[in-house]
Amino acid sequence: MDNKGYAFTPLAFLLFIPVIVVALAMGNIVNELNTISTIAIGGDVTFSAATNVYTAIREGAADAGRNGAYNATRKVIDDRSYLTDSKSYIRDQVVSSLNEHVLSACKALETQTGRSIYINNISINNYTTQVFTSSDVSITQEDPFGFYVNVRGGIPIRIDQTNQSYSGLTPPIKVYVSIEGIEDPYIWINSKERTTSVIYKYQYYTTFAGNPNYHFADAGVEQDKIFHLWDAMNGTDNPSKIYPRPYYFLDTQGLSFFDRLENKTISTSLSPPYTKMSTFVLGDPLNEDHGTDAISFLDHEYFAGVAGYTITTKNHNTITAIRQPDSTGTPNGPIVYLSNPYKIILGLTNSPYALT
């Protein structure tokens, strides 16, 4: 009898048994599904944590590379002393910054996920400050305006939680680090701290079969203008208002970024040709040393005291020295000198404007 006074026959009572059984069975299924979901979600969080560790290493390597390059230039400038092994110096800077970044990111990740993280078989919470060593990182260069930070593959990663664990090996990581916008200590120190130069890439050159064409002598709108040479010398728009800032251009006879940190010459440089660059030194900051204006204004030749010749162009039978233009476009800047070899290298010997 129910609470309203209705009576149930034995047959009616039997009809409730399947419902009770089904309800009990459904309760077990729901509990099992909840368990399975918990395992699946937990496994997904563990895997995501591992993915975030890889991301932290990649992002840390990129930031550390740029920071290492900047610190290397500042050390040379501030100490007024060149480095003996600039790649090793930057690598060690990268290792230090990479450790700091990855440990900080992984400790935050442990707090967020409740997982324990191990890198290189070292727990990030054992009060260590280093899970990467210099043997894990290398520096390589493939073009003049940046370098690669390489973190070796095969570094063990383990993510632990109760009844769950993820183990894996890192893939090789290779990130490009631009050096554009970084000051060139080579020019600053060699000019007795009178000329500052910041590395920005000259944008008008093209290459064919590995040979660059600078288009300096291309025909321009003005008949007496060597088309892109002025642009290369005028450089950036000088947001810092420090004048001048000539562009750097690919030059297999020049000096690489690492050469510049070590004050190498073209005869002592061991850098591959495709990693080298040059720029211009305008004016004559070392005039009292040279005793003459007839010197090269290409950076490494200028500091070596290489004899140069005035670049001139014929315009209606008038010989005019190439000078950096002022705001009106009138060439009122310093005269530019180039050595004969660089007239050939830069394509200025056979100019339609009869360079002499």
Image (tube, grey):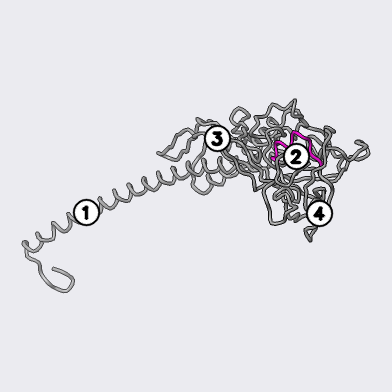
Residue that appears at 81% across and 54% down:
331
Which of pointers 2 and 4 lies earlier in the amino acid sequence? 2
| Above or below for 13 versus 89 | below
Q: Secondary structure at mark 4?
A: strand
Asked where in the image residue 209 lies, by quadrant, the reply is top right
| Above or below for 349 versus 8 | above
Picture disc at residue 24: 1
Q: Of the residues shown, which amino acid type is indicated by label 2?
A: Thr
Which of pointers 2 and 3 lies earlier in the amino acid sequence? 2
The span from disc 3 to disc 1 (Cα, nearest Å) is 45 Å
Q: Nearer the viewer, mark 1 or mark 4?
A: 4
Label 1 packing within 10 angstroms: few (<14), some (14-19), many (20+): few
Q: Of the residues shown, which amino acid type is indicated by label 4?
A: Pro
Q: Secondary structure at mark 1?
A: helix
Determine whether, in the image, residue 287 is placed left or right of residue 355.
Answer: right
| Mark 3 lies on residue | 123
Asked where in the image residue 338 lies, by quadrant, the reply is top right
Residue that appears at 85% across and 40% down:
191
Label 3 packing within 10 angstroms: few (<14), some (14-19), many (20+): some
Does the image show residue 106?
no
Looking at this view, name the residue that lies furthest to the bottom: 4
Asked where in the image residue 179 lies, by quadrant, the reply is top right
| Mark 2 lies on residue | 73
Q: Of the residues shown, which amino acid type is indicated by label 1?
A: Leu
The span from disc 2 to disc 1 (Cα, nearest Å) is 73 Å
Q: Nearer the viewer, mark 3 or mark 1?
A: 3
Picture disc at residue 331: 4
Q: Provide residue 261's location: percent of width, then percent of height.
A: 75, 34
Q: Are marks 1 and 4 in contact (CB under 8 Å)?
A: no
Determine whether, in the image, residue 7 is placed left or right of residue 68.
Answer: left
The residue stretch that appears in magenta:
337-347
